Image (cartoon, helix red, strand yellow):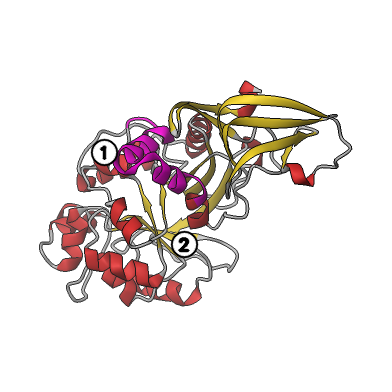
Amino acid sequence: MALTTLTAEAIFDGSQWVRQVGVDNGIICPLHDVSPWKSQHSRHIKGVLFPGFVNAHTHLDLYFELSSKPFHEWIHDLILQLTSNYNAQASVARSLHDHWMSGVRYIGDITRAPDGDYKSTGIQVRGFEEFIIGYPEIHPQRHYSPHSLYTVNSDFLRRFSRENRSRYQIHISESQAEFDYFCGNNNDFYRNYLCRYFRHSYKGRPQTPVSFLHELGLLDKRAVLVHMGTATEGDLQLVSSAGASIVTCPLSNQYLHNPPVDVSQLEALKIPWAIGTDGKCSRHKLDFLEDYHFLGQKIGYETAFAAATAGGAAVLGLADEYTLYGKTLEDVVVGFGSALNWQRVASAAEVW
């Protein structure tokens, strides 16, 4: 098959903006890798070609409807759903479909089924194996997610800090109630939520959740901190010094009446950050474009694009895999709109 030179309004190859790429036997390639004797045809796409969005934090298996409520009230509805009418396999399939349709091709998933095979979906999934009550056998090549500082026993967390060798995710500083619980401001978080499901409670000195994470030995470059909407300026300085990363889930935060982290502060402190949707159960609609627009309108679309693409891949440890090259047109995405402010996205194969 002859080589085709492909141009577009703009092309981001995963690490840089380029003017054109090649399509050789159906596979995208950099033109300098192509034999010069091959005859060439040209095609142009009216949109921005890129490897796809990176959703750095979601729960694929939590695809169902729950009402918008404060977190400590919503969590009871979630637990009831998980212990009654719940089909994890169907939830995963529906989540993957919605992610694909909104241009997501890379996912950081908090999972209870770490050996899931997603190759046939066209989406690369990095699974973070969640644990809450029990402590798993830690394998150096796997990625984990201790759920939170308030659900996982502190002894487990200290052990995890010694045994873990990989990038991990943890929900932290998500709500004001959680923040107040660790700072000793009030005990409503324990009375209204934790005491119904857990025997243990925090007995340490009053401090912020991020400070406690640091005390446990878990705040380092492996840490991917999810939410962080109630983190203090001092917390963010600690995160920056430790080389940790943050994932913001702004629309999920709003749905659960929580503040999202101020990403302009992350930019100022040069903290690596990414965008997540969280699970379908904590939002109206599972559409990554909505989160992308929410942030693009606040901080500019160039900054939001960086976090939603290569920046997000780096946070997940997938920087080397985040590329156009070696992919089919079906695998990659085109954004349509004004510059990086897109009204819709589609697989490149649909507009080829």
Find disc 2 in the rendering and name its residue. 168
- Residue sitting at x 32%, y 59%: 268
Find disc 1 in the rendering and name its residue. 255
Circles 2 and 1, Cβ within 8 Å, touching? The answer is: no
Number of disc labels: 2
Amino acid type of the residue that numbered disc 2 sits on in the rendered structure: Tyr
Measured in 3D between alpha carbons, the distance from the residue under mark 2 to the one under mark 1, in whole angstroms, is 25 Å
What range is drawn magenta here?
A: 284-310
Is there any visible trace of residue 352 in the rendered image? yes
Q: Is residue 297 above or below residue 237?
A: above
Q: Camera-side residue: 233 or 254?
A: 233
Residue 233, quarter of the rendered image: bottom left
Residue 149, quarter of the rendered image: bottom left
- Residue sitting at x 55%, y 39%: 52
Q: Residues within 10 Å of mark 1 (few under 14, many from 20)?
A: many
Q: Camera-side residue: 310 or 83?
A: 310
Amino acid type of the residue that numbered disc 1 sits on in the rendered structure: Tyr
